[in-house]
Image (cartoon, rainbow, N blue to C red):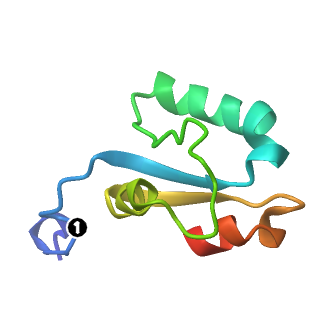
Amino acid sequence: MDPSSTSSSSASQTWVYDVFPSFRGEDVRETFLSHFLKELDKKLIIAFKDNEIERSRSLDPELKQAIKDSRIAVVVFSKNYASSSWCLNEL
């Protein structure tokens, strides 16, 4: 079957972002993540950048919308990722 002839829920979806990175900022923001985002930019892949959104117990509405508006999520697991309620809420 020709994959271009199949329909999927994402076929008609208009994405704002190609990638939503989920990560523990203090673990990877200045190391792995900065390099990862730079490589995505080089390839013209649009990633959501949180620009240090204020953290709270619940997900910010802007962040929830960014997750919905992203084609895929890339989860960057790190030592303290699972100890963050914020990160777990993103998942």
Q: Is residue 76 left or right of residue 67?
A: right
Q: Relative to 88, is 28 on the left or the right? A: right
Q: Amino acid at mark 1?
A: Ser
Could you tell me residue 89's position as x and y percent? 60, 74
* Position of residue 5 in the picture relative to residue 22 (left or right): left
SS at mark 1 in the image:
loop
Residue 2 shows up from this direction: yes
* The N terminus sits in image quarter: bottom left
In the picture, residue 22 is in which quadrant?
Answer: bottom right
Residue drawn at the location 20% of the way across and 74% of the way down: 9
Nearest the viewer among 5 and 45 is 45
Asked which quadrant contains residue 64, the reply is: bottom left
Q: Position of residue 79 (x, y in %)?
A: 90, 60
Kindly identify which residue carries mark 1.
10
> In percent of the image, x 55 and y 35: which residue is there?
51
Inspect this view and state whether residue 91 appears: no
Q: Residues within 10 Å of mark 1 (few under 14, many from 20)?
A: few
Query: In which quadrant is the C terminus drawn?
Result: bottom right
Q: Residue at x 12, y 63 (%)?
A: 12
Is residue 61 or residue 73 the one in the foreground?
61
The percent coordinates of residue 86 (x first, y second) are: 66, 66
